[in-house]
Amino acid sequence: NKQVVLRDYVSGFPKESDMNIVEGTITLKLPEGSDEVLLKNLYLSCDPYMRILMTKVEDPDFFSNYKPGSPLTGYGVSKVVESGDPDYKKGDLVWGITKWEEFSLIPSSLILFKIEHTDVPLSYYTGILGMPGVTAYAGFFEVGSPKKGENVFVSAASGAVGQLVGQFAKLNDCYVVGSAGSKDKVDLLKNKLGFDEAFNYKEETDLNATLKRYFPEGIDIYFENVGGKTLDAVLLNMRVHGRIPICGMISQYNLTQPEGVTNLANLIFKRVRMEGFMVTEYYHLYPKFLEFVLPHIREGKIVYVEDIAEGLENGPTALVGLFSGRNVGKQVLVVARD
Ligand code: NDP
C-alpha cells in the first residue's frame, strides 16, 4: 500500500523532501464488527490548507495536524471495497476525507458523500463538485450576499475555488475582475473563464492604483483567497456596505511572521462586512448546490480547468506547487482510474 507520509513538521515554504513515499501494509478485509469503510483511492485533491496541517501546533484542539511518519489526509474520490456502514456498499463511488495512499480504512463518520452522477468526469468531485465547489458557492452566495450588477474582485482567480467564484458572479450579472500570477492564467481568466478583466499581480507595482483602474467606482465584493498586500490594497477600494468573504490567505501560510494589514479602519468608514468562513459549516447545502451547478456543467455554461498529476509518487511535487503557483486550475492527483 504505497503512501505519502509527512517526514517532519514543516516551517516556512514546504518542499518535496518534507514528504516521503513509503510502502505500507493494509489488510484488504474489514476487521470483524467494524463500522468503517475500506476505500480504493482514485483521485486525490491537493489543497492549500494541507500546508497548515504540516505545522507543529501547540494547541491540538485548533487543528488536527499531520503526524510525522503518518500518511497525509485530505479530500479524495474513492471506490468502496468493503463497508461496515450499511449506507455504503461495495462498488459505490464516494468523495470525502481519505488518506494519501492506495487503499484506506476510514470512519464513515468523517466527511463522506456518495457519488450519484457519473456523466461528468469523476475527478470533478475533488473540485467543482466537491469541497472547492461548495466553498465557492457558500462563500460567494451565502457570505458575499451578491446583488445583480455588483463589482466583484477575486484573488487566486484561476485556482480551484477562484475560477468558480468568477463564473458564479458572471451568472449573477456582476462585473468581475480576477488576479493571478502569470500571463497564461490571465489569458485563461479572460478567454475561457469569462472574467471581464484580469491582471497579473506579480507585475503590478502599485496594487492600489491597479484596483482603482479596474474599479473606478469601487469594489462591492472581494472574495479573499490570498491575504497580505492584496487585502491591504482592496481595503482602500471597497464601496460603502461592501462584503469581504475571507476564504483563505495563502500568501500567509508559509510565513513564520504573518504580514500586518494596515488599512482596516476603512471597514468603519465604508461600513464593510468582512467575514471568515469554513466550508465544513456549509455541507448541508450540498444537494442544493448540485441542483444548481450540474445543469450549468452539462450545458457548458460553467467550465472547469484541472491540472492533473499522475501517480502517488508525484503527490509531493503537485502539493508543493500550489505555493509557487505551478498549478493551472484545480490540482488533482491520480492514484488509479478505476
Ligand atoms: P488554488 O487552486 O488557487 O491554488 C493556489 C494558488 O494560490 C496558486 O496556484 C497561486 O496562484 C496562488 N498563490 C500561491 N501563493 C501565493 C501568494 N504568496 N500570493 C498570492 N497568490 C498565491 O487553491 P484553492 O482554490 O484550492 O484555494 C484558494 C484559497 O481558498 C486558499 O487560500 C485556500 O486555503 C482557501 N480555501 C478555503 C476554504 C475554506 O473553507 N475557508 C476551503 C477551500 C479553500 P497564482 O499563480 O495566481 O499566484
Image (cartoon, rainbow, N blue to C red):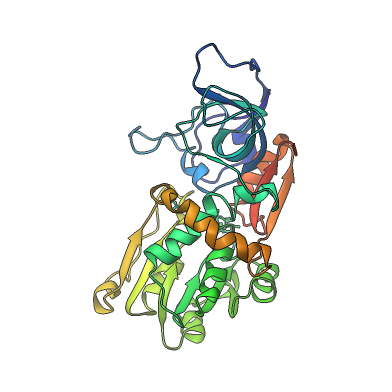
Relative to 266, 155 lies left or right: right
Viewer-nearest residue: 229 or 87 = 87
Query: x, y (%) of residue 210?
Result: 51, 81
Query: x, y (%) of residue 258?
Result: 40, 54
Toward which corner of the image does residue 299 lie, by quadrant?
bottom right
Relative to 103, 227 lies left or right: left
- Residue 226 seen: no
Quarter of the picture containing the N terminus is top right
Residue at 57%, 70% in the rendered image: 167
Residue at 53%, 77% in the rendered image: 176
Query: x, y (%) of residue 256?
Result: 43, 47
Relative to 150, 163 lies left or right: right
Relative to 142, 3 lies left or right: right
Count of numbered tags: 0
Viewer-nearest residue: 209 or 296 = 296
Residue pushed farthest front? 86
Quarter of the picture containing the C terminus is top right
Residue pushed farthest top? 32
Residue pushed farthest bottom? 216
Viewer-nearest residue: 116 or 312 = 116
Toward which corner of the image does residue 140 lie, by quadrant?
bottom left
Viewer-nearest residue: 280 or 308 = 280
> Please, is residue 289 above or below residue 44 in the view?
below
> Please, is residue 216 above or below residue 165 in the view?
below
- Residue 102 seen: yes
> Please, is residue 5 above or below residue 183 in the view?
above
Query: x, y (%) of residue 327?
Result: 66, 55
